Image (cartoon, rainbow, N blue to C red):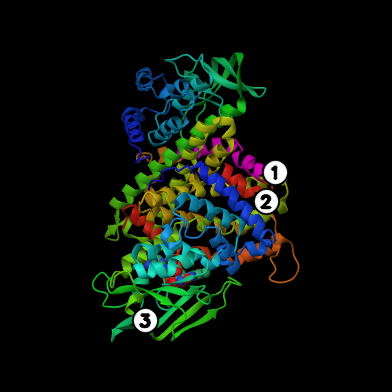
Amino acid sequence: MHFELLELPSACEALRGEVRAFLNEHIAERSPVDRALSWSGGDPEFSRRLGARGWIGMTWPKRYGGGELSALQRYTVLEELLAAGAPVARHWIADRQSGPMLLRVGSEAQKDAILPAIARGECYFCIGMSEPDSGSDLASVRTRAEKTGGKWVINGSKVWTSGADQAHYMIALVRTGDAGENRHGGLSQFLLPMNTPGVEVSPIPSLGGDSDFNQVTFTDVELDDDALLGEEGAGWSQVTSELALERSGPERFLSSLQLLIVLCDALGPEPEPLAKRAIGECTAELAVLRQMSLSVAGMLEAGEDPGVQAALIKDLGARFEQSLVNTAQRLLPIAPALRGPGSDYAHVLRRISQLAPSYSLRGGTREILRGIIARGLGLR
Amino acid sequence: MSGHDSEQRLLYESLERALGPLCALPEDPGEWPAAAWQTVEAHGMLDVLAEEPQAWPLAVTIAAALGEYPVPLPIVETLLVRAFDPDAARGAPATLEAADGALPWGRFCRTALIGREGSCARTTLEDVQHTGANLAGEPRDQCRIGAAEPLAVPVQRLASGLALLRAAQCAGAMRACLNLSRQYVLERVQFGRPLSRFQAIQQQMAQLAGACAAADVGVQYAGRRTRQAGLDEAAEAIACAATRVLSAAAEVSAIAHQVHGAMGFTLEYPLHRYTQRLGAWSAELNLGGWAERLGGRALARGGGDFWDGIVKI
Ligand SMILES: Cc1cc2nc3c(=O)[nH]c(=O)nc-3n(C[C@H](O)[C@H](O)[C@H](O)COP(=O)(O)OP(=O)(O)OC[C@H]3O[C@@H](n4cnc5c(N)ncnc54)[C@H](O)[C@@H]3O)c2cc1C
């Protein structure tokens, strides 16, 4: 399980300054409790501005609206956006995984039609993997696409779909044939416009507050042949590489940073030694996770497959973030209130307390990630 | 170790060859094992910092190898003394005051670096007052101190150097725990199958691997920062490494023992050599107060600059 250290080139430090200036200009007024939504907080106007600045689809070819910049430059922008709690939710999934999937396996027509709009911050995606009866066991999905008269007809449903109510497209994993012996056959991915007749989105209220996830049902949804993404029957290997993109970024340990920030301010510069020690432990954990994550960014840039390393960081990151609520409560006990007046600390603590259980679920549960790591160790 | 970098790998292999056979030395040898020391001197590992003051990543690699191959000799100590004291004698071991005030292997050393009014001083060790040992049985002695000659080195710098290499030793010992545990769960059969087939074991092994990787990255990063910026400027990176290593060591030790069952509790099986060293070295790191210092700095900067602090570590 090797992590090669990576150094951000000096160009990234100049870029970091530009991102901070941009954020100062555009989100200086954003409240701590809104910042604490992290990448599940969204604002279409912010996404558009970020796109206009060239910070969406940064690594993609220019002919598709990208910037042909390096993965490390992109990493720098991402970590600054996350650290500031910028409202990135609308374009986040499209930039992180859907756009890159289109680049990898999409047709020329699909790429031409969609990538430039993503890069402008105007086209959003949602992830159509989980279903009511298929969570961790993703290969068991039952939503079906049948080919009838030159059209694909889709029936079934997806669930827990973040941002489905706002998205323009879903990349949906569906069954197009028999599973075969290894259970991974007969799956395909579709590029599914959310405004297609027969697609119905119902929000599911959650602990995530403003950023609900949804149930999406498909009733005789008709798609043209060109809605197939990649190859028919190659859905499993495609979705596996999509998951690697989904798991590898710094959002897997930076989504509760706002809690640490308000906690430091609330503790003041000279708290008791035990408080200093606890903040020091959080600092060390974050700084090391950041180096591990940079290392993964370097592997991605070099065309390697850091699937196991990414799972490892996501697991460590989730555990760290989940421990923060307890750390905060220990150092500065207040009762987080759902409503009513309160300090920034009280509000952020409330929000992070509510979001924390999702960290070890979304994007692959702790148990599934540890299974991947154990396989990397040759134990299964 | 750093598998991709072939130079590093060659170095690590040469360390494995040199250190492996010396691990069989008793922790408390009674008499100075002169022949073993000769092997160590001949390899050149003791002089890497004396010859190339920026070679901290190399020193980290050596210390990590000493965690994985825990030769009971004052190698890390001598390496550091030669780094800080240009006049240190070659051919002989030397030691320095550890965070708990003890002198590792003091009974075999003629000179030591100690702290005097915030600076380092070179002293001669006149005679041994108490012989002691840490949790792992490594000698930790008290000696009568002779004349002290001050060196132009702040004592904090020495403490940083020692913490960095102790943390690296811990990272190496954790690697050994991971390797032993991996082998053991693949071979030990219960309920008709290897332990590695049980999901509860797999999940613990994944956690163990995570802690090892974090410790390793922490010390590697601190080594690189020290090469670039020197020990004083890299103090926060070293504090991060020491702090992260502490929490990882506790987790690794607990899991490694758990998956080994009673076998790991025996003195015959080698696991204890690593876990007891992790305990001893952690205690030493803990006394350094690295986490408090790190947190103190972050709190002094305030929440608004917390992230910038992380980026600049
Ligand atoms: C906030 C949030 C947003 C989400 N957004 C999306 C989205 O946009 N798109 C999408 O497709 N999905 C989304 N998900 C769903 C997420 O991917 C699933 O929750 C996850 O894959 C787990 O599936 P499940 O919830 O059905 O739990 P289950 O798979 O039923 O698991 C329940 C528990 O059993 C454990 N378990 C299951 N199988 C095993 C096993 N083999 N061994 C050991 N333990 C096991 C799990 O680890 C977990 O602890 C989201 C989830 C959350 C919480």
Label 3, label 1: how far apart the Cα atoms are: 59 Å
Coordinates of residue B12 in the picture (x, y in percent): 35, 33
Q: In this figure, which residue is indicated by the disc labeled 2?
A: B303
**The quarter of the displayed image where residue B67 is located:** top left
Q: Amino acid at mark 3?
A: Leu
Specify whether residue B169 is painted magenta: no
Q: In this figure, which residue is indicated by the disc labeled 3?
A: A223
Estimate how packed mark 1 is, as few (under 14), some (14 to 19) or many (20 or more) residues with alpha carbons within 10 Å.
some
Above or below residue A75? Residue B91 is above
Q: Amino acid at mark 1?
A: Ala
Coordinates of residue A10 in the picture (x, y in percent): 52, 41
Above or below residue B125? Residue A124 is below
Q: Amino acid at mark 2?
A: Gly
Estimate how packed mark 3 is, as few (under 14), some (14 to 19) or many (20 or more) residues with alpha carbons within 10 Å.
many
In the picture, the disc for residue B300 is: 1
Coordinates of residue A18 in the picture (x, y in percent): 59, 50
Work out which residue is located at the far front of the displayed protein and give it: A63
In the picture, the disc for residue B49 is: none
Whether disc 2's CB lies below 8 Å from ligand 1 is answered: no
Specify whether residue B295 is painted magenta: yes
